[in-house]
Image (spheres, rainbow, N blue to C red):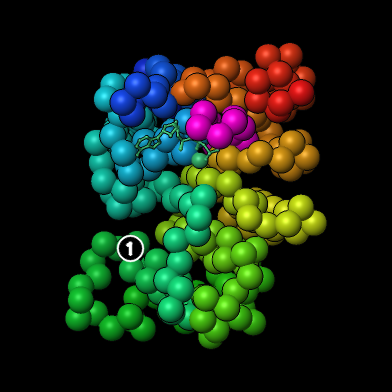
Amino acid sequence: MTQALLQTKGLQLAFGGVVAADNIDFELHEGERLAVIGQNGAGKTTFINICTGFIRPSGGSVSFDGRDITRLTPRAIVQRGISRSFQLPQLFLEHTVRDCIRLAAAGRSGKLRIWTPLGKVIPETEIDHILELVNLRERADELCSLLPEGQRKLLDIAMALVLRPKLMIMDEPTSGVSTDEKHGLMAIIMRVLDEQKITSIFVEHDVDIVTRYATRVAAWISGRIAADGKPDEVLNNPEIRRNVIGE
Ligand SMILES: Nc1ncnc2c1ncn2[C@@H]1O[C@H](COP(=O)(O)OP(=O)(O)OP(=O)(O)O)[C@@H](O)[C@H]1O
Ligand SMILES: [Mg+2]
């Protein structure tokens, strides 16, 4: 098999007595769409935080594209090609949608200085194109604070896309959105990722969404990967049905 795009070996992390990462060995290959499932507190966000440099593991390593990234900063990891979105969108609420894209683009080069005019960070045509991809072009000049939750989620994704990732990691892209809206939201996100040939990991609690959009599922229980494989295998695994899906 080809070299893994993302690989972790023996990841360990505990918060006090809580083991949030328990010896995690994991590989992801280009083109995969991995759904991460698991009960609250299982360690899904911790895994993402470790892979994106927001927290350091106490043991083990992460590599991306064959290079060790365990001790890099979040910005250095973005520059290697991993973008993420957040469980709660990290927007600049008092700014416009367009400015949020500019601010995100400023992190792309890492060269933004306080005196660089924000208008020069990214061409307007590129902003328009990215907003078009996520159906937000019409709202470009509105304040983020006016967007409903579903559009905030899309803007968070657009801000991650502007960084031109090879891998996009999304922490609950459909949380806080009504069940009716979830499929529409995921359809937009997945269409864009497909078009741009971006490999993805998404955390999701809704089994229908997982079944519809994932090519692979990994189930977390108490900081470890309890099952990992094809969606129907993992979702029909009795341990996962009992302890993760809650039947
Ligand atoms: N910064 C922190 N300080 C202390 N404990 C933490 C910290 N971050 C996570 N934890 C604990 O580690 C465990 C794993 O948390 P994590 O946020 O990774 O879970 P999760 O699977 O993302 O859950 P959820 O579905 O609720 O988002 C939990 O018990 C959580 O309380
Ligand atoms: Mg979480």
Q: Is residue 245 above or below residue 198?
A: above
Q: Relative to the observer, which residue lies in front, 209 or 242?
A: 242
- The single residue placed furthest to the front in the displayed view is 17
Question: Residue 24 in the image: x percent, y percent?
Answer: 43, 20
Determine the image quadrant of residue 25. Answer: top left
**Where residue 150 sits: x, y (%)?**
65, 63
Name above or below for residue 192 compared with residue 201.
Answer: below
Identified by mark 1, the residue type is Gly
Q: Is residue 149 rendered magenta in the image?
A: no
Does residue 32 belong to the magenta stretch? yes
Q: Give the quarter of the figure containing the N terminus.
A: top right
Compare residues 185 and 133 and report the one nearer the observer.
185
Left/right of residue 174 with respect to residue 28 in the rendered view: right
- Relative to residue 80, is residue 191 depicted above or below? below
At 73% from the left and 14% from the top, the residue drawn is 238
Tell me what residue is drawn at x 59 percent, y 30 percent: 38
- Residue 48 appears in the rendering: yes
Q: How many marks?
A: 1
Quarter occupied by the C terminus: top right
Taking 55 as reference, is 99 left or right?
right
- Asked which secondary structure carries label 1, the reply is helix
Residue behind mark 1: 107
Magenta stretch in the rendered image: 28-42
- Residue 69 coordinates in the image, percent (x, y): 30, 36
Position of residue 64 measured from the top left corner of the image (x, y, whole percent): 38, 35
Residue 32, visible in the rendered structure = no
Q: Is residue 89 above or below residue 172?
A: below
- Name the residue rendered at 36%, 51% in the picture: 78
Ligand 1 sits in quadrant: top left
